[in-house]
Image: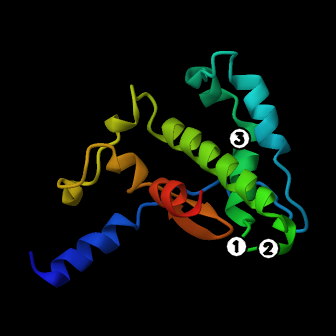
Amino acid sequence: MHLPYLAFLLSLTFSCTITPNPTIPVSDSDFSHSEFDTFLHQHVDESGLIDYPVLLKERPNLDRYIARTAHVSPDSHPALFARESDRLVYWINAYNAATINQILAYYPIANVGDVKPPWYGFFFPQRSGFFLFTRSLYGGRALNLYYLENSII
């Protein structure tokens, strides 16, 4: 494979993005996980299962939290995340919220392997469509779940 072709494929690999709802107002003077906590209490049962069909219709807390993480992160607003534990809580919650949001974007799916990479990514592993080719915003920076899990968390 020629190097320019590979560079082109890699640039496409990391260009797919799921963006949050831009109409949700977000403050950059503080950060709270309260919307995500409320969402978890409302939509996750004792077994840790989420009722995705119901969530498709009732997702305002998740949408607000996704908008908040898109606007504010430990990288974009380090003063809001002074301790390492604050940064870790942010990244773990943001990762989990983005995973749920991406499942909803592709719902109904049986598992994350159902999200296929684009045609030019046929040589990537099966679950790469979900973990590599979909990205979310964190403090204005678009990242995929693979990078979050393996480089940040």
Is 103 situated above or below 8? above
Numbered disc 2: secondary structure: helix
**Residue 124, x across and y down, in percent:** 24, 54
Residue 30, label in figure: none
Q: According to the image, label 1 marks what residue?
A: 75
- Give the residue at x 63% y 22%: 48
* Callout 3–callout 1 Cβ contact below 8 Å: no
The N terminus sits in image quarter: bottom left
Q: According to the image, label 3 marks what residue?
A: 62
* Residue 28 appears in view: no
| Dot 2 amino acid type | Pro
**Going by the picture, which residue comes out furthest to the top?**
46
**Residue 149, x across and y down, in percent:** 52, 54
Relative horizontal placement of residue 141, taking residue 61 as reference (left or right):
left
Nearer to us in this view, 59 or 44: 44
Q: According to the image, label 2 marks what residue?
A: 78
